[in-house]
Amino acid sequence: MSSFWFDNWIENKNLIEILGVAKDSVAHPEIKVCEFIRQDLEWDVPKLKQFFNDHPIVQKIQRISIAIH
């Protein structure tokens, strides 16, 4: 399972790099990407917005296709 913050799952970068934040400043560093995907294989936008409000990264994540496997 991919780390939401530390694995390269957005344009071969991690969220720490993209957002330019310190590793020790992230909320819930153990959280996984799969925790932001609903059972119908769509992004859980309300959960993403809990972390980012209306930051443009939410729209970028929403454009990522979710693989079935």
Image (spheres, rainbow, N blue to C red):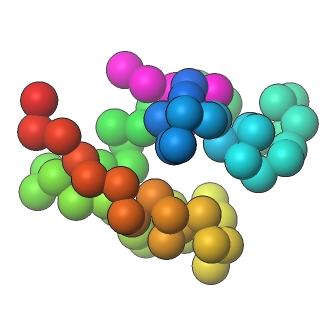
Stretch of the chain drawn in magenta: 1-6
Q: Is residue 2 magenta?
A: yes
- Image coordinates for residue 20, horizontal then vertical, percent: 84, 47
The reply to whether residue 53 is visible in this rendering is no
> Does residue 63 sit above or below 28 in this rendering?
below
Residue occupying image coordinates x 76% and y 39%? 17
**Where is residue 8, by image quadrant?**
top right
The reply to whether residue 17 is visible in this rendering is yes
Residue occupying image coordinates x 34% and y 37%? 34
Foreground pick, 6 / 39: 6
User: Quadrant of the image for the N terminus?
Assistant: top left
- Image coordinates for residue 10, horizontal then vertical, percent: 51, 43
Name, please, the residue furthest toward the bottom: 54
- Image coordinates for residue 60, horizontal then vertical, percent: 50, 64
> Does residue 27 sit above or below 46 in this rendering?
above
- Is residue 24 left or right of 34 when viewed as pictured? right
Q: Is residue 56 magenta?
A: no
Residue occupying image coordinates x 16% and y 52%? 41
Dominant SS in magenta = loop
Residue occupying image coordinates x 74% and y 38%? 16
- Image coordinates for residue 2, horizontal then vertical, percent: 43, 25
Foreground pick, 55 / 27: 55
**Where is residue 69, by image quadrant?**
top left
